[in-house]
Amino acid sequence: MEHVDALVLGGGAAGLFCGGRLAQRGRRVRVLDHSRKPAEKIRISGGGRCNFTNLETEPKCFLSENPHFAKSALARYTPWDFCSLMAEHGLTWHEKTLGQLFCDQKSGAVIDMLIEDLTAAGGVLALDTSIHEVRREGEAFRVQTSAGPITCDSLIVATGGLSIPKIGATGFAYELAQQFGHEVIPPRPALVPMTFTDDHRDAFSDMSGVSLAVEARAERGPGFAENMLFTHRGLSGPSVLQVSSYWHQSEAIAFDLLPGMNAIDLIRTAKADTPKQPVSQFLSQHFPGRFANYFPKELGLEKSTRLAELSNHQIDQFGQALKDWTLKPAGTEGWRTAEVTAGGVATDGLSSRTMESKFQPGLFFIGECVDVTGWLGGYNFQWAWASAAAAAEVA
């Protein structure tokens, strides 16, 4: 039976990075993954360029039942620490918007870097290896795999969440956590498009491909001033993906369609200057034509209704609707298109400094399987690096 100091379950971003840092500490390390290829989420990230971190990383950019939990790990391993690692390997990057850093080389270069750090320090990556059973035996863990049993002193769980099942996502981490006495916050799809039914679905489908600059917000959580995109099934785009992480079934989401503008003043001024102007023409000065023709229906108006025909009360309603267009999604597109998983292994049972279980010494949970979920734009990779680095210090 093989024995290692540290066994990492999951060969994704967090698992590979943790394995490499453990090996560099001189630990005998093996990283296992049931897939034939490692780190598929890295490979598909950023359109193949890997949005590997975000310079604006702060604890407020992460959701968790305990909003303070991520602070320690994020403070001790920063975006610049990972940039330094990239530079050591000759990789370069560029910033797009809102602090998002993308690799100039293809995403595969980041994967190769992580594997190189692991293997150069003596660690081993074993792919296409499934886990059949995990149990505690004395001071060690015994893991039964498709390649035979392995025992280890430290067991690091980095098997991710439920998002994008086509690349191998499973609920393994949650089952293992519960086996060892941990609570699991019910997982739900996050950073995912929203779906609608009935009239809204038909209308949004007709506007598929139309994009608006908005500020979106859920009933809980901050507002996000980014683009919204109409799709055949509902709404997507960065602002919608962001609020989806905060959204819960049966809740509403709201959109400021004219962020930074006083909509009522705009309508009153337009009515005074061009009273014969149809409301759709007024809207077309601020929005794409298909949306400008559609939106009057939200107010019970015809698109040909002239501004002169609007009462003061109707103008107030019109302006309020533009600043607070409230919709109730039927749901989301689910795990198939969700970029990450919200919820997961409850942080109350983990050390915020080391990610170690408070119930089972030597057991660690890192990355997406933990109840810490970042915003869109590289934050979830930064959590993978930071939580992995925290565990690798002591595992």
Image (cartoon, helix red, strand yellow):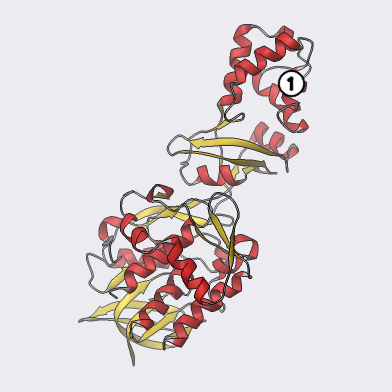
Q: Is residue 124 left or right of residue 41?
A: left
Residue at 63% across, 70% down:
105
Residue nearest the viewer, comparing 296 with 102: 102
Vertical relation: 12 (above or below) 95 = below
User: Is residue 10 visible in this depiction of the protein?
Assistant: no
The quarter holding residue 187 reads bottom left
Instruction: Classify 10 Å Cα crowding around label 1: few (below 14), some (14-19), many (20 and above).
Output: some
Vertical relation: 112 (above or below) 99 = below
Residue nearest the viewer, comparing 82 with 340: 82
- Please name the amino acid that badge 1 sits on: Phe
**Residue placed under numbered mark 1 in the picture:** 282
- Mark 1 secondary-structure assignment: helix
Residue at 58% across, 30% down:
259
Q: Assign the C terminus to one quadrant of the image.
A: bottom left
Residue nearest the viewer, comparing 274 with 245: 274
Residue at 69% across, 22% down:
297
The number of numbered badges drawn on the structure is 1
Q: Position of residue 209 (x, y in %)?
A: 73, 43
User: Is residue 8 visible in this depiction of the protein?
Assistant: yes
Q: Position of residue 174 (x, y in %)?
A: 38, 63
Vertical relation: 227 (above or below) 379 = above
Residue at 41% across, 69% down:
158
Q: Is residue 285 left or right of residue 351?
A: right
Q: Assign the N terminus to one quadrant of the image.
A: bottom left
Q: Position of residue 68 (x, y in %)?
A: 31, 50
